[in-house]
């Protein structure tokens, strides 16, 4: 459901103009980078939270909630200030086109307000997931997404008497939906059996818990930063190869994010399921869960490949693109189809099973070697030195996930992730 927001933006703005769609796609890379850090904070809380929930320690979970909120709010304040005061500088990192910079800057000034709200709501949702309140999370996210898409239509096209705001309308819709999402999180969490933040103790520091949190958070943040900045670099490289390449990549990225929902969901569930059992002291059962989930990752990967190939003709016809952009998009979809095998296997195995047992350092190492040591240098050389075709450069950006599967399987079989992280 969350991925549908980007899809809705791309589809609706794609019916307005290619420049509007492309500018917003590039501008949302700023939130993508913010989400990298939020994912690390929420991920560290989820790893420890799942194990302490399996152990039955609610007090430590509340302290974890406070930790997550402190870090998330500080981080989001920095991104908010950047979007409000230097949006043009942020946009220049992704494109040199003056029109795209102007449209994207206007978008960021409005959407920046939503970044403050996201920090709090994502902390609430992360704690709900590890405490067996997954269904309310799904309902809250779904409600926020549906409202976002409806408001997108109203403000982008100027329906129901509203002004026609185009890209700025997408930003306003996002911000209003985040207000509603946070309100729902607070309302639902006020119910019985929910873990809530201790606002009076929000800035009270538990030294041992902070140390354990940092041990999980910093490797996750390092890995997320390498992955997120790497992905943003891919967008920037293709964005500097021309408007057609940027437009095609914008649409392909939306499809990728939608198809990746399956492996992302299973990966999150894997971390919680494995973590619950390991925290409860059931190491063998946690190990058995991990093996079954690893096997499932290959099934999801091949299914995702088939799905991308199946929807390619439909996607190419759905948005208004130039003939050159449409040709690039078709090739990108075929390349991405095979990339999905590695993406699904690695997401579920690394971000789910390995992280569930606290083996968070491996992801950072593998990204440093495969993405930053191989894929990004090849893409940079291909785009700016050798002047390769767009599709060949795009293929370079997909090398890292497929290439590291054997290394991931070797790490998995060492079973360093089979451990209990909780303390008395």
Image (tube, helix red, strand yellow):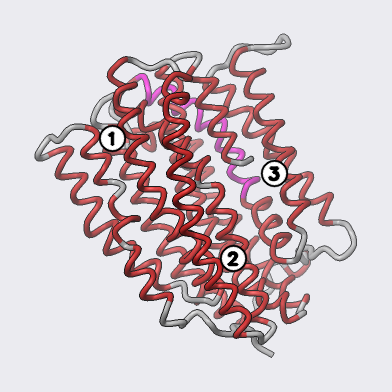
Q: Residue at x 44, y 31 (%)?
A: 25
Up-down relation of residue 12 to residue 240 (above or below): above
Q: In this view of the protein, can residue 73 be seen by the observer?
A: yes
SS majority, magenta? helix
Q: Position of residue 174 (x, y in %)?
A: 62, 33
- In three-dimensional space, the C-alpha distance between marks 3 and 1, rounded to whole angstroms, equals 31 Å
Q: Residue at x 36, y 75 (%)?
A: 410
**303 left or right of 179?**
left
| Mark 3 or mark 2, whichever is nearer to me | 2
Up-down relation of residue 328 to residue 198 (above or below): above
Looking at the picture, tell me which residue is in the foreground, 331 or 91. Answer: 331
- Dividing the picture into quadrants, the one containing residue 134 is bottom right
Residue 153 highlighted magenta (yes or no): no
Q: Residue at x 76, y 64 (%)?
A: 132
Secondary structure found at label 3: helix
- In three-dimensional space, the C-alpha distance between marks 3 and 2, rounded to whole angstroms, equals 20 Å
Up-down relation of residue 54 to residue 308 (above or below): below
Q: In this view of the protein, can residue 45 be seen by the observer?
A: no
Instruction: Read off the residue under disc 3.
Output: 141
Q: Position of residue 68 (x, y in %)?
A: 63, 64
- Magenta range is 99-118
**207 left or right of 138?**
left
Q: Which mark is residue 270?
A: 2
Label pair 3/2, CB-CB below 8 angstroms: no
**10 Å neighbourhood of mark 1: few (<14), some, or many (≥20)?**
many
- In three-dimensional space, the C-alpha distance between marks 2 and 1, rounded to whole angstroms, equals 34 Å
Instruction: Read off the residue under disc 1.
Output: 238
| Mark 2 or mark 1, whichever is nearer to me | 2
Secondary structure found at label 1: helix
Q: Earlier in the sequence, mark 3 or mark 1?
A: 3
């Amino acid at each position: 459901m969350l991925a549908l927001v980007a899809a809705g933006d791309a589809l609706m703005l794609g019916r307005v103009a290619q420049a509007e769609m492309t500018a917003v796609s590039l501008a949302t890379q700023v939130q993508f980078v913010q989400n990298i850090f939020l994912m690390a904070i929420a991920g560290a809380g989820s790893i420890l939270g799942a194990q302490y929930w399996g152990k039955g320690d609610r007090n430590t979970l509340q302290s974890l909630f406070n930790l997550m909120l402190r870090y998330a709010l500080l981080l989001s304040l920095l991104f908010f200030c950047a979007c409000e005061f230097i949006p043009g500088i942020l946009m220049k990192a992704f494109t040199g086109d003056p029109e795209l910079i102007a449209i994207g800057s206007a978008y960021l000034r409005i959407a920046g307000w939503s970044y403050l709200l996201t920090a709090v709501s994502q902390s609430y949702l992360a704690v709900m997931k590890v405490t067996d309140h997954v269904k309310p999370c799904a309902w809250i996210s779904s409600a926020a997404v549906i409202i976002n898409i409806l408001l997108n239509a109203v403000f982008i096209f100027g329906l129901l008497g509203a002004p026609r705001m185009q890209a700025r309308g997408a930003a306003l819709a996002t911000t209003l939906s985040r207000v509603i999402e946070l309100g729902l999180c607070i309302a639902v969490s006020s119910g019985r059996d929910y873990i809530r933040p201790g606002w009076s103790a929000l800035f009270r520091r538990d030294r041992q818990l902070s140390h354990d949190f940092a041990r999980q958070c910093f490797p996750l943040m390092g890995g997320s930063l390498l992955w997120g900045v790497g992905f943003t670099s891919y967008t920037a490289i293709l964005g500097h190869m021309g408007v057609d390449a940027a437009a095609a990549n914008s649409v392909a990225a939306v499809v990728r994010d939608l198809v990746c929902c399956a492996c992302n969901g299973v990966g999150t569930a894997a971390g919680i399921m494995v973590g619950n059992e390991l925290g409860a002291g059931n190491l063998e059962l946690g190990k058995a869960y991990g093996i079954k989930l690893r096997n499932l990752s290959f099934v999801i990967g091949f299914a995702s490949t088939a799905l991308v190939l199946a929807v390619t003709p439909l996607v190419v016809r759905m948005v208004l693109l130039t003939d050159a952009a449409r040709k690039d998009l078709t090739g990108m979809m075929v390349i991405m189809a095979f990339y999905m095998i590695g993406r699904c296997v690695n997401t579920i195995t690394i971000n789910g099973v390995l992280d569930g047992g606290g083996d968070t350092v491996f992801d950072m190492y593998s990204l440093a070697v495969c993405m930053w040591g191989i894929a990004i240098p090849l893409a940079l050389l291909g785009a700016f030195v050798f002047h390769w075709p767009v599709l060949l450069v795009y293929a370079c950006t997909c090398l890292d996930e497929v290439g590291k599967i054997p290394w991931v399987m070797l790490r998995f079989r060492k079973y360093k992730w089979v451990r209990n992280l909780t303390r008395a």
